[in-house]
Amino acid sequence: EAAINRIAAGEVVERPASAVKELVENAIDAGATRIEIDYADGGKRLIRVTDDGCGIAGDDLPLALSRHATSKIDGSDLLEISTFGFRGEALPSLGAVGRLTITSRCGDAAASITVTGGRAEAVRPAALSRGTRVELRDLFHATPARLKFLRTDRAEAQAIAETVKRLALAEPFVAFTLTDLSGDSPRTVFRADAQSGDLFDALHGRTAQVLGRDFAANAIPLDAEREGHHLTGYAALPTYSRGSSVQQFLFVNGRPVQDRLLIGALRAAYMDVLSRDRHPAAVLFIDCAPRLVDVNVHPAKSQVRFRDGGSVRGLIVSGLRHALAGAGH
Ligand code: ADP
Ligand code: MG
């Protein structure tokens, strides 16, 4: 059983950044308004995510660690998923590839559980003022072959920051702090205060925090619809440049994705106004009825399959061109 868990875990947890993604998504699903992410040695030694969400009752801690146990669907509504999680795979996977401790408060009692290499210890009383803290230590130490495939601490830390920034764009009303604990004193890598106002205001403020004030000052709002698909977000004017860095953040029904169809459509929209060697900068959200898209292609959920890809491509190309033309491009 432990071996099977470790193999399956590899699909969900490829590297520290994928663990961070799962834990932050859980915090968002729990209704957190403030999420703190700490790591050490590129996440290989430590990943810790602390939230102020609803918490897990002590009695439910062992359940949260068992495979395919999720509190988020009842089995009847797989097509109407609104939470990030729905497979109940992340926590058992993390518990199989490292030393995982979950401390959580629900009501007025806090408890914790530790699982190492898939083996859980007993639930213990703990101290925590609110929410949940999940700590993952020594990722892949029991599987040196996997550890060897990780990149340098610096590269893994960069992937973590990228992941946190993507999720921060998707959740502008939530506060995020990312801290590197590798050195003698903690170093704040990224901080984004909770935004307020309507969604466009909040997202505009968040783009300034994530992509920089220069992006925000040069970004035009997007709001278009086609055949049940809704496009919102911000796209940078073609005159905006960030040198060689690629600033493309794509979301489908609130989930960060890196999808060829969407990236291709974004490029096509700028074809006439941006030289070929430059990448258009944009934060795009596509929202549609869950039945129009399959986000279930891969456990890491980064690829999606639209039922009507042509319509989505058309929406992005025409929505962006219309917005760019309106801004004089
Ligand atoms: P999934 O997110 O797919 O349900 P996970 O393995 O990620 O599966 O989590 C299992 C369960 O543990 C969740 O369904 C949820 O009930 C609980 N859980 C995990 N993380 C948190 C959290 N940060 N706050 C509250 N509950 C959590
Ligand atoms: Mg989850």
Image (cartoon, grey):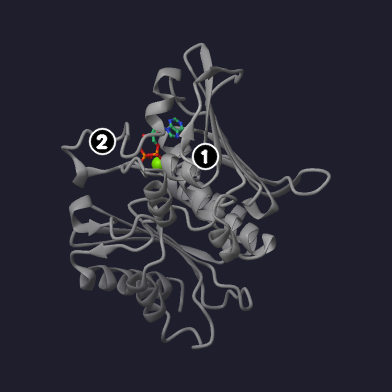
What residue is rendered at 60% in x and 64% in y? 148
Q: In which quarter of the image is the N terminus?
A: top left
Residue 115 image label: none
Q: Pointer 2: what residue?
A: 73
Specify whether residue 15 is in view: yes
Instruction: Determine whether label 2 and label 1 are within 8 Å by CB.
Output: no
Q: Quadrant of the C terminus?
A: bottom left
Mark 2 vs ligand 1: CB below 8 Å = no
Tell me if residue 314 comes above or below residue 110 in the rendering.
Answer: below
Counting residues from the start of the chain, the first of labels 2 and 1 encountered is 2
Q: Specify the amino acid type for callout 1.
A: Val
Judging depth in this view, the residue of 89 and 202 nearest the camera is 89
What residue is rendered at 47% in x and 35% in y? 119
Judging depth in this view, the residue of 97 and 237 nearest the camera is 97
Tell me if residue 112 comes above or below residue 97 in the rendering.
Answer: above
Tell me if residue 236 comes above or below residue 112 in the rendering.
Answer: below
